Amino acid sequence: MLAGMSTIAIPMHQQVSDHIRQEIVSGRWSEGSMIPGEIQLSEQYGVSRSTIRQALASLRREGLIRGVQGRRPIVCKAVPSQPFSVFMSFSEWASAIGRVPGQRTVEIARRSADAATADLLHVAEGDPVVQLLRVRSLDGVVTMLERSRYLREVGDLLFEMDLDAGSIYAYLRQRGVDLASGRHVIDAVAADAVDAEHLGVVIGSPLLRARRTAVDAQGKVLEVADDRYLPEQANFIIENHYSANTGMARVALVG
Amino acid sequence: MLAGMSTIAIPMHQQVSDHIRQEIVSGRWSEGSMIPGEIQLSEQYGVSRSTIRQALASLRREGLIRGVQGRRPIVCKAVPSQPFSVFMSFSEWASAIGRVPGQRTVEIARRSADAATADLLHVAEGDPVVQLLRVRSLDGVVTMLERSRYLREVGDLLFEMDLDAGSIYAYLRQRGVDLASGRHVIDAVAADAVDAEHLGVVIGSPLLRARRTAVDAQGKVLEVADDRYLPEQANFIIENHYSANTGMARVALVG
DNA sequence: TAAGTGAACATGTACGTACAACATCCGATT
DNA sequence: AATCGGATGTTGTACGTACATGTTCACTTA
């Protein structure tokens, strides 16, 4: 039976999927091999087949297994998937890929929101917001220029922090600000004068832009950012599978 | 009741989710509003609550609705997730977002693989591959320049097809070629002479590049492509959540 | 007026049954 | 020997029940 059962109410199907996920990521169930059938799993875990199906549905969504009707599911080959915090935070990302993150804060300021910022942050035009401009590097190599704007109540915390020391994301979480989801809109832009100066390229050079929005559990927008990467230094990978839907889209712009 | 029911076996839950999806994308159920409860839907469609839940689960996965226990689900604002085929195929994508896809084939040729192509397609250098250069448009507006290279056995099928007519992806699937997963590596590049000519921009303009790899169920690489988008016409959106791992990553390049 | 309580409603979890559709393999027939 | 069936195993679909857990709102009470 399940090892980690405790008194707090963790749904059965989640306990099962967690357990199976362990089998997979630990490598005990190797890539490409078939996993036990639904009936066998239901006997093994002592739950109904419906519950097993619910658990397997999660794993399918995550892309860990896939299969077709009539055949037992097989373990997918590893996807280059990064957990939320790694994808949201430059510092945590750098650490996760074994590089040393660096940052130089060009400016931090509290000022009134212009129309565009107000719209993105869902505040009124003229409301105070905290604006941040940072150059970020990997192993000392300049990689990205970050323009962030924070909701005032969140941004004010940043004045108490040593911005060049560590991860803003980790700091905010420690202070009770919990980001729950994020959205990256990715396109390409030509470097403007500010980009050119800080990234060390000529004006007009192609940059990879990720416009980022960070949202808390209640759906309140806490941060919007415009990150511009040197395309030689970093890029984004999206991997998707026939059976597993992932949170990505290609969109067309009107006009 | 359901309008489009027919004799062929489309699962009930899919018919329901298709129907509800229509209500949403058509705007009849407006963004942010609550949708009917599960019980009410089950009476409306004449199916069990289990079936309704299965339908709603799909919509939740696609990001069209969201909700919490005890409260009726609400219609999400716009976009997020697209199914595999929509993300892999330009034509299916265009249709899904309500635009008319267009294409002009500049060249289709069978030639020997150069070193870079051979490496990506996992064939020997000099092996024959099928190479394709197409300009793709939305509603008649030039959007993307596609450079594809196909494994010979797959690419040969394309000579029998009217390339300017429809979706290669759909055609290949019909011919028994089933793509199972894909990978997009996204960055920015400056337009070269070929890009400039076909996309109507000046050399050096920033373009959004997606280097695409399509793989079948056995893990064999069938197609590699270099798609260059006008950043004003299309971009990529990645949405991720604290709890759900999705198949995306930001990577750093060495050297 | 403000806070608290509970009924009504809604979704989440878990069980169960029955049958349909598909894959695989083995044996019989050609 | 090759092909065609059918048995068997497996997942997909659809139904149903029961109870747990969470939200909302109207009404009661302090």
Image (spheres, coloured by chain):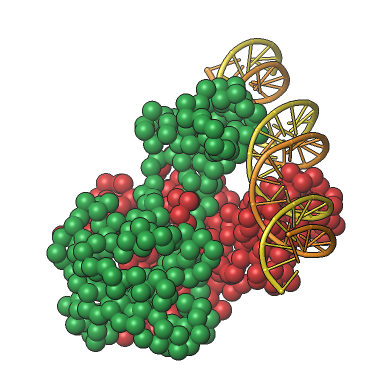
Chain colours: A green, B red, C yellow, D orange
User: Which percent across, then down, holds residue A253?
Assistant: 50, 78
Q: Position of residue A155 (x, y in %)?
A: 36, 73
Residue in the picture at 27% in, 85% down: A192
* Any part of residue A29 in sight: yes
Lateral position of residue A204 relative to residue B236, left or right: left
Q: Nearer the viewer, residue B98 or B72?
A: B72
Q: Residue at x 62, y 27 (%)?
A: A47
The quadrant in which residue B134 appears is bottom left
Q: Can residue B239 be seen here?
A: no
Pick the front one: A230 or D4: A230
Q: Please give the name of the residue rendered at 44% of the width and 39% of the height, measured from the top-left corner.
A: A76
Reply above or below: A8 against B58.
above
Q: Is residue B215 left or right of residue B1?
A: left
Q: Residue B226 in the image: state x and y as whole percent.
A: 36, 64
- Residue D24 horizontal/vertical position (percent): 72, 62
Count up the numbered dots. Answer: 0
* Image vertical order of residue B97 relative to residue A175, above or below: below
Which residue is painted at 33% across and 50% down in the image?
B121
